[in-house]
Image (spheres, helix red, strand yellow):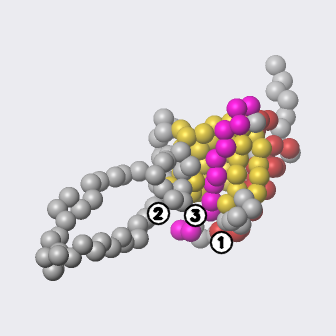
Amino acid sequence: MQTKPCNLQACEPLRPNDETTEVLPMIVKTVKASSRPQREEPCIIKEGDLELIRNDLPGFKKPPRTAARVVLNNSTFSIFQTDNFADIMFSCTLKELKLENDPNDVNCFKIINQRNNQAKGLCALAMNRESMVDQVKSWKKNILMFQTSCQRDLVS
């Protein structure tokens, strides 16, 4: 997330004794997290961009959402801030992953690492060609499929 100083040289009031202030709404622009293409190969990998609800950032009335790269493979579920794998925000094995619906927003869902109770909220990205509800349904369906149908014992 990029930040910059805001209004370092405030304008002088039009009237000398004017003490009123006006707080304008915050403008947030969402961009894709990565330039990599969305990818889906059943029981091998699903990767794409979603919005990550950033409950870890203090000072907001409503937690901001930032674009994130989500990678699901046949053993882990991971969230990255960018294309760079060093920018990992969350990772969990599929065996320890719990999936929950977001009761407040049909365009979002929650994932929980049952080992340490770390939870992250993910939402559909409005910039995607697929509807937001369909994006969420697809991700939830794939997570459940990867957890159940795609698990095979490794042969030594």
- Name the amino acid type tagged 1: Ser
Task: Tell me, for residue 1, which label it has, or none.
Answer: none
Q: Give the magenta range.
A: 115-127
Q: Which mark sits nearer the N-terminus, 3 or 2?
A: 2
Q: Is residue 76 visible?
A: no
Answer yes or no: do the residues labelled 3 and 1 have beta carbons within 8 Å?
no
- Name the amino acid type tagged 2: Thr
Residue in the image at 17% along x and 62% along y: 9
Task: Give neighbour class at mark 2: few <14, some 14-19, many 20+ (Cα, 10 Å).
Answer: few
Q: Which mark sits nearer the N-terminus, 1 or 2?
A: 2
* Badge 2 element: loop
Q: Is residue 93 left or right of residue 14?
A: right
Answer yes or no: do the residues labelled 3 and 2 have beta carbons within 8 Å?
yes
Label 1, on which residue?
A: 131
Residue 96 belongs to the span the image colors magenta: no
Instruction: Assign the C terminus to one quadrant of the image.
Output: top right
Task: Tell me, for residue 30, which label it has, or none.
Answer: 2
Residue in the image at 54% along x and 56% along y: 63
Instruction: Quote the CA–CA distance across marks 3 and 2.
Output: 9 Å
Label 3, on which residue?
A: 125
